[in-house]
Amino acid sequence: MKKIRLTAVLMAAMLLLSVSSAAFAEGFGVYEWSAAGTAMGENYMFAEDDPAVLAYNPSAITKLDGSYISFGTSWVNPATSISFTNGPLNAGRSSEYDNEYSPAFTPYFYYAKKVSSNGWFGLAAFPRFGNNIEYDDAWAGRYDTIFSGVKGITIQPTYAFKIGSKLSAAVGLDINYVNLKMRKDTPAMAGALGYLGDLQSLVEGHSTNLGWVASLTYDFNEKTSAAITYRARVKQTMDADASFYGSLAMLGDYRLDTRAHGTVTLPDSVAIGLGHKFNDRTRMEINAIWTNWSTFNALNLTFDDRVLGVIDSSNSVKDWKAAWRIGIGLEHKLSDKWSLLCGYVFDQSPVPDERMDFMVPTGDRHRGSIGFKYRPTENSEIAFAYTAIWAGNRYVASQLNGMDFTNAYIHDGLTQIVSLGYTMKLK
């Protein structure tokens, strides 16, 4: 048993070290927090015998008797097509582009233990934010982005306790890490000389700050429960490396290496859920999450040194809005060994039409999931899930210095996700 536990911990550590980035929820939120949860469309606030509830509803670990460990990952493959309708940057080039997404992995790890007669401790590590999208260097939207990458992971120590026989509560710390990498082109203008060519820019940095999470679960009876989880906003202030380089008319090769500084406030959110057991074999959840994406009102950077002696900042207005995510999930136990899970989610885009760009190029999303649990022993469980996400079509009118420079139609957005996880009761 000790060898099995050590192997499980080592595998979980390897998964976390391989964390990648992808965007497949509203904004650049990530909700693939467990394989079993993904199978239910991430409607997983009342899961039984699974420490993964630490991500969805931490107060639910008060239903765990003993100590548990869970780890796994999701493989994500998103794709979107873009059709350009006009714009000088597309002259002489194809009007059709496909996003060059790199398939991403989103690993997770959870541990929970009953530590006293009325106390539970949990430790969670899971991705909450991500974006990974890349285009051809010469494509028509290159002043918006060529590559946009966000990797965000939360480390969450949690303490939970019961208040009477029906109410449970939990509080936790959100140790929030974000890595940002952005590459795009910038037109070089020199007064009377006019346009000299394009400078490529690369900005890369990381930041860590603290937030918190709190949740409550109320059991109306043995079959029906309600829960609420609040996650606080996190302000990330980043000092990044920035490089500008290119070959310009009359100036020749140009390169500037400097430092960039910016601040982004990641949104707070409220999740509410209702869970009901129809019988010993079948249960259902209805969940809704409100995410305050209005905190992402701009992506502004300032530079220590002026580019070409003129440019000292990069400003991009976002003005995102709060968005809802509403879903339903079902779990049915077919036998002592097998359970079937499925779920559906409607995911509202927080990006208003007038601020739509190519960094997060999707509209409202519809998500369908299906999966299973297999229990090879009394104390272990394997979960598998397949998810398809269909994104709504959007028009983009990207701007440069307040003027439209290219228009496009984003369509045929489809993200496919395959998830695999393992849960074990240690004692």
Image (cartoon, grey):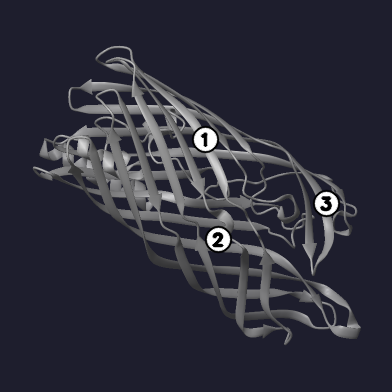
Q: Amino acid at mark 1?
A: Ile
Between the C-alphas of marks 1 and 2, the distance is 21 Å
Give amino acid for label 2.
Thr
Give the image location of residue 146, x and y in percent.
Answer: 68, 58
Q: Could you tell me if the residues under marks 1 and 2 are in contact, i.e. CB atoms within 8 Å?
A: no
First along the sequence among labels 1 and 2: 2
The answer to which quarter of the image holds residue 7 is top left
Of all residues, the one furthest to the top in this rendering is: 335
Displayed quadrant of residue 101: top right
Counting residues from the start of the chain, the first of labels 2 and 3 encountered is: 2
In the image, 67 versus 109, the foreground residue is 67
| Residue appearing at x 33%, y 55% in the figure | 155
SS at badge 2? helix
Hey, what amino acid is under mark 3? Answer: Asn
N-term-proximal mark, 3 vs 1:
1
Q: Is residue 79 left or right of residue 261?
A: right
User: Which residue is identified by label 2?
Assistant: 295
Rounded to the nearest angstrom, the CA distance separating label 2 from label 3 is 27 Å
Residue 112 image position (x, y, % from top left): 21, 43
Q: Residues within 10 Å of mark 3 (few under 14, many from 20)?
A: some
Query: Pointer 3: what residue?
Result: 407
Across and down, in percent, residue 361 comes to: 67, 47
| The label number, if any, that marks residue 23 in the structure image | none
How many marks do you count on the picture? 3
